[in-house]
């Protein structure tokens, strides 16, 4: 057998050995093409953004819209100020469907439509109560809310602090929490409450907000996923403990 014939047979042998591997790669590629879209769709349906996605998301009737934190802050502020008839920040470049959903809420029932990733605030100093009954960080939240939403029905704090009326480990006793009331519990008040809750979440990083609780749902700054969780109230029949009539917001303790 000459060298040319041997080389030809060698090439044909190598080709036959490579074919099964190539076919396996084709099958794997086709399978991934079918499976990955379904996995991504499942993540969206579960209420969280795709890993590595936007800082904030707004759920519209057409799906989720990603926003930067700055866009979420401008959008939620514009919605609140526009409702009061006050000049609002520029929302150019922000998806119109997201703005509409933030202003109107879900069509079928009031509920959360915006969430942002938690930033996990760290290296904050511990703060003590001031004369208002709030820590400086909590007072900053109170002042910021008043600047955007105007006069509100607030509670959960008092000069000198509060010592009862809340759970044993409540952040109200540390002067780190504020309740924004929307009474009675009606569809209109729930939608108004969600506008406040969305604004707080959008501004959580700047205001060092730790938790927002409202309407049987909660958002945590400790979560890296942009989503709301179900809040398990200690007394399911109690609308106050379920936070149906008020938005609870508290700030990080620090330390």
Image: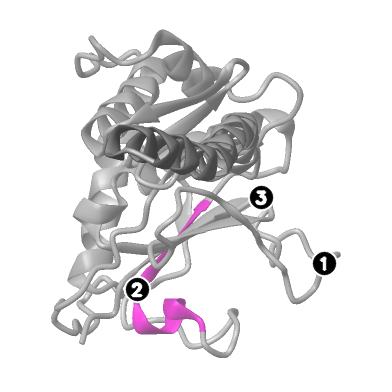
Image coordinates of residue 190 in percent, x first then y, are 64, 37
Q: Quadrant of residue 172?
A: bottom left
Tell me which colouring the rendered structure shows: one colour
Among the two numbered marks 3 and 2 on one chain, the one whose residue lies closer to the N terminus: 2
> In front here: 161 or 145?
145
Residue tagged by mark 2? 176
Residue tagged by mark 1? 236
Residue depicted at x 75% and y 76%:
234
What whole-number distance in Å separates the C-alpha atoms at marks 3 and 2?
A: 20 Å
Query: In the structure shown, which secondary structural element does the residue marked by tag 3 occupy?
Result: loop
What whole-number distance in Å separates the C-alpha atoms at marks 1 and 2?
A: 25 Å
The magenta stretch spans which residues? 170-180
Residue tagged by mark 3? 215
Q: Quadrant of residue 59?
A: top right
Residue lying at the far right in this picture: please name it: 237
Instruction: Indicate whether 131 appears above or below 120.
Output: below
Residue depicted at x 48% and y 42%:
13
From the viewer's perspective, is 216 left or right of 6? Answer: right
Image coordinates of residue 105 in percent, x first then y, are 59, 24
Residue depicted at x 49% and y 20%:
103
Magenta includes 101?
Answer: no
Q: Residues within 10 Å of mark 2 (few under 14, many from 20)?
A: many
């Amino acid at each position: 057998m000459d060298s040319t014939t041997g080389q030809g047979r060698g090439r044909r042998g190598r080709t036959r050995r490579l074919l099964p591997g190539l076919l396996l790669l084709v099958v794997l590629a086709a399978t991934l093409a079918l499976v990955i879209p379904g996995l991504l769709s499942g993540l969206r349906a579960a209420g969280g953004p795709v890993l590595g996605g936007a800082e904030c998301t707004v759920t519209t009737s057409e799906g989720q819209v990603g926003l930067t934190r700055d866009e979420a802050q401008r959008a939620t502020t514009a919605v609140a100020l526009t409702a009061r008839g006050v000049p609002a920040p520029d929302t150019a470049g922000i998806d119109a469907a997201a703005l509409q959903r933030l202003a109107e809420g879900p069509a079928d029932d009031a509920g959360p439509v915006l969430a942002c990733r938690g930033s996990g605030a760290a290296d904050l100093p511990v703060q003590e109560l001031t004369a208002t009954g709030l820590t400086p960080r909590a007072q900053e939240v109170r002042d910021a809310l008043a600047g955007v939403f105007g006069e509100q029905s607030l509670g959960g704090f008092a000069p000198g602090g509060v010592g009862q009326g809340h759970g044993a480990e409540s952040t109200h006793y540390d002067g780190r929490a504020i309740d924004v009331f929307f009474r009675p519990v009606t569809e209109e008040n729930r939608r108004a409450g969600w506008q406040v809750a969305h604004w707080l979440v959008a501004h959580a990083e700047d205001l060092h907000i730790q938790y927002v609780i409202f309407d049987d749902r909660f958002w945590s700054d400790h979560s890296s996923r942009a989503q709301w969780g179900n809040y398990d109230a200690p007394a399911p029949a109690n609308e106050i403990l379920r936070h149906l009539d008020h938005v609870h917001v508290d700030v990080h303790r620090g330390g």
